[in-house]
Image (tube, rainbow, N blue to C red):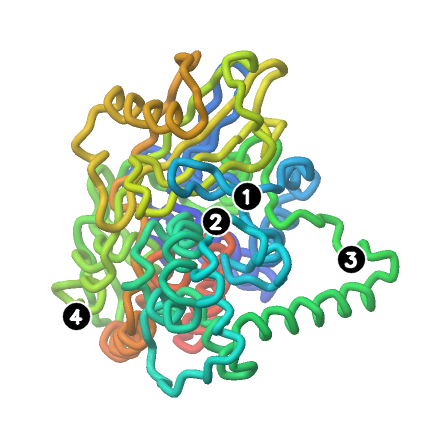
Amino acid sequence: MVVVGGGITGLSTAFYLKKKAAENGENIKIHVVEKADRFGGKIRTFRRDGFILEEGPDSFLARKEAALQLCRDLGLEVQLTGTNPDARKNYILRKNKLHLMPPGTMLGVPAEITPFARTRLLSPAGKLRAAMDLVLPRGNDEHDESLGLFLRRRFGDELVDHLIEPLLSGIYAGNADLLSLQATFPLFHDLEKKHRSLILGIMKQRKQQRIRQKQIAPDGKSSKHPSMFLALNSGFDTLIKRLTEQLERDGISLISEALVTQVEKLQENGRPHYQIKLTNHNAIRADAVVMAAPAFATQKLLSKLIATEPLSQIPYVSVATVGLAFNKDQIQHPLDGSGFVVPHKENRFITACTWVSSKWPHTTPEGKLLLRCFTGHSGDERHKDLSDEEIVTRVLKDLADIMGISSEPEWTHVSRWNQAMPQYLVDHLSRLGEFESRIKDQLPGIMLTGAGYYGVGVPDCIAQGMQTAEKVLSYLSDEG
C-alpha cells in the first residue's frame, strides 16, 4: 500500500499500520511518498549557536493522548518537558498595551468570575454583555453554525474580538466568523445544550475534573506531566528523526523528492487496485492508498476519478514565523510569561509573539533571549509579497512599539509556510462525510487523512494516523 504525504499524519499512519499488522502476524509492504527533500511536514527545527528554534509547532497538548502515546512507542517520553512554571502568564494587546490574560479562562471563555471582573482588557459594558451568557437561553439550531457568531451570540462582540478571536487565530490563523463550530470546538455546542450557559458548563466541567484527579491521586499529582503543553527538549524534529528511523528498521520504503503525478484505478478480478505514478521514481501498484497530502493536492490527484468539489471548499492560509535572538541586556521588557497575542482589530503586522526563552528555557543559551513572532491570517497574507528582510523590519517595528525593543537582534530566521493552515468552514464535517461516503463506493481502498480534515494540531494528526491505520488494516483484511 502507498501513503501519499510524509508529514506527521502520513508517517504515523505507516508506523501504526506496520505495528498493528505485525501484532496480527501480517506483513504489509508500505511505501511513504513525499515530494519534499525531507519528511515531517510542518515539524521543523532550526538550530544555531546553541539555540533551538521551532519553525512550526513547538509543542503539543498533553491532554490529547495520541502524541504522548507515539512518544512512548518511540522511547521519547524521557525527553518530554513541560512549559516553564514561572512563565505561565499570557498577555493580549489592546490599544498598544499588553494586558494580562484573565486566569481561569478556556479559550477566552471566563470560568472564574473574579479575575474576569478585574481585567482591564474589556470595558465595563463588555464585561456585562459577556456575563449575559449566565442568563441567555440555549440556542435552538441543531445545524452547524459559525464559531464566531455562536460566541458573539453568547458573549457579545467585545469579548470575541479582544479575547477569544486572537487565541483562535493562534490555532487556525482563521476568521472565527467563518469557521465551523462543529469542526473546531464542538464542546462549546455540547456545553450549551447540556448546561445552557457556557460559563456555568465550563465551571461544572472543571469541578468534575478536579474531583476525578483527586480520586486518581489523593496527593493531587495525577499526571507525570502536569504541564498543559509538552515539548521535546532536543527539538521537535527529534520525533520525526526517531519515527523515520523506526520506519526504515521496519522495512517501510520512504521515498522523498518524488511528486505524485497521477493516481490510476485498475480493475483486476473484480477488485480495484491503484497505480501511483511519480517523478524520479518507478510507478507503484497498491491495493490501498492513503492520501495524507493537503486537501488541494488530493483534489488535483483524484479529480479524474471522482468529483472533488468538497475538497475545493477547504481553503488554506499562508503564514510565516520569525525567530529573533538577542543578548539578555538588549531587552528591558520583563519576559515574565509565555508571550502575547494580537487581536486583528489592533491592525498590527504580527499576530503573536512567543517569549521562547521564558516559555522553554532549554532552547536558549545562558545570557541570551529568543523570541518567535507570527504573521499572516485569513484576510491578511501581505507577508507573501515581502522579502525576508522586509518581514523582519515590520516585525521589529511592532516589537519596538509593543515591547520597547530598540536593539538589533544577533540573528533572525524567517520560516514561510505557504498554504499551510486549512480552514474548516461552516458545514465542513457534513461535506466531508458525504465525500468520504462517495469515495468508499467509487474508490474503495483510497482514504483521506491529515490536517485538512479532522484536526490541525499534532496530536489530532497523529490520532488520525492511528485511526487510518485501523481502517486500512480492516479494508485489506476484508479484501483478502
| In-front residue for pair 315/97 | 97
| Left or right: 477 in relation to 75 | left
Task: Find the distance from the CA under tag 2 to the CA under tag 1.
Answer: 8 Å
| In-front residue for pair 452/248 | 452
From the image, state whether disc 4 or disc 3 is nearer to you.
3
From the image, state whether disc 3 or disc 2 is nearer to you.
2
Q: Is residue 136 visible?
A: yes
Q: Is residue 287 visible?
A: no
The residue lying at 63 percent from left, 15 percent from top is 366
From the image, state whether disc 4 or disc 1 is nearer to you.
1
| Left or right: 362 in relation to 178 | right
Q: What residue type is labelled 1?
A: Leu
| In-front residue for pair 359/36 | 359
Q: Are the two marked residues, 2 and 1, in contact with CB atoms closer than 8 angstroms?
A: yes
Residue holding disc 1: 100
Q: How far across and how far down the image is residue 375, in percent?
A: 32, 37
Q: What residue type is labelled 4?
A: Ile
Residue holding disc 2: 121
Task: Find the distance from the CA under tag 4 to the CA under tag 3.
Answer: 49 Å
How many neighbours does mark 1 have within 10 angstroms: few (below 14), some (14-19), or many (20 or more)? some
| In-front residue for pair 88/280 | 88
From the image, state whether disc 2 or disc 4 is nearer to you.
2
From the image, state whether disc 1 or disc 3 is nearer to you.
1
Task: Find the distance from the CA under tag 2 to the CA under tag 4.
Answer: 50 Å
| Left or right: 146 in relation to 309 | right
Quadrant where the image shows the C terminus? bottom left
Specify the label residue 306 is tagged with: 4
Q: Earlier in the sequence, mark 2 or mark 4?
A: 2
Residue holding disc 3: 222
Quadrant where the image shows the N terminus? bottom left
Q: Which amino acid does label 3 sit on?
A: Ser
Q: How far across and how far down the image is residue 211, in percent?
A: 77, 69
